[in-house]
Amino acid sequence: MTQDELKVMVGQAALAHVVAGSVVGVGTGSTVNCFIDALATMRGQIAGAVSSSEASTARLRAHGITVLESHLVERIPVYIDGADEIDPHGHMIKGGGAALTREKIVADLADRFVCIADESKRVVTLGRFPLPVEVIPMAAAQIARRFEALGGRPVLRAGVVTDNGCHIIDVHGLSIADPAAMECDINQWPGVVTVGIFARNKASVCLFGTPRGVETVRYDASS
Ligand code: 5RP
């Protein structure tokens, strides 16, 4: 099976996690695009969606799915999104599509984070994928120096302005042994909007697309 076929498979499998009658949280990316296309078949059974990016909002609306502003929604039962990497505890690196800040905001509204990914995203330790960090532009150089001091190689993502008007730095060469501690630390740096480590808002479950079918892995909330 191709990677695209695996994405379609997990996008469809995620429908089983959508709670009928409720608002569903929707992430961003090529895997989520497959989920949105599948969700169109359920549009009459949900109260709408909260979206994590302008791109996902446009795709949801093109399918006739109502998109609600996140500030109008207090809680949602489930948030469905992809990941760039996921470790054995459900900690993730996200932000390959530059939507990490809104993704974290919508994930924070949700009781459960359902990750959908092809099995190539599975890692033992986060960090092979360059860590995306959304930054206020005037702080980018100072934040890059801080990452160099940690042994990373920061690269400004050329030509990218996020939905929030900010920039993305991709940090290569990090080995993220303690994702929760690193997330907490980097979030304190002045000018960091969001770091793409999702350890506090980690996955509750991941649906991995494999040539053998969908493999469902559940994660312990306390680890
Ligand atoms: C966007 C994200 C995506 O979920 C992540 O990049 C995975 O994308 P894809 O499904 O295209 O591989 O975090 O900011």
Image (cartoon, helix red, strand yellow):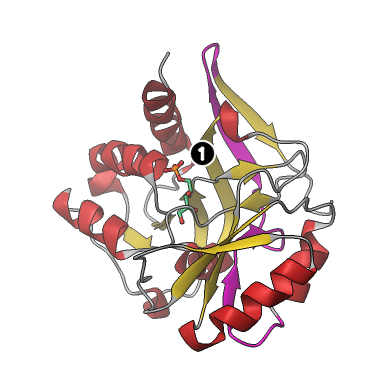
**Left or right, 68 with reference to 127:** left
Question: x%, y% of residue 80?
Answer: 48, 49
**Left or right, 37 with reference to 117:** left
Residue occupying image coordinates x 30% and y 56%: 56
- Compared to residue 30, the image places residue 53 above or below, namely below
CB at disc 1 and ligand 1 closer than 8 Å: yes
Is 106 a magenta residue? no
**Image quarter for residue 182?**
bottom right
Question: x%, y% of residue 201?
Answer: 65, 61
Specify start and end residues of the magenta stretch as a single range: 188-213
| Label 1 residue SS | strand
The quadrant in which the N terminus is found is: top left
Is 201 a magenta residue? yes
**Left or right, 69 with reference to 78:** left
Q: Amino acid at mark 1?
A: Ile
Name the residue nearer the viewer: 115 or 189: 189
Question: x%, y% of residue 198?
Answer: 65, 59
- Compared to residue 213, the image places residue 123 above or below, namely below
* Residue position marked by numbered label 1 in the rendering: 116
Residue occupying image coordinates x 17% and y 48%: 63
Question: x%, y% of residue 122?
Answer: 65, 34
Badge 1 crowding class, 10 Å Cα cut-off, few under 14, some 14 to 19, many 20 or more, is many
**Image quarter for residue 42?**
top left
Name the residue nearer the viewer: 106 or 74: 106
Residue occupying image coordinates x 65% and y 50%: 92
- Compared to residue 150, the image places residue 38 above or below, namely above
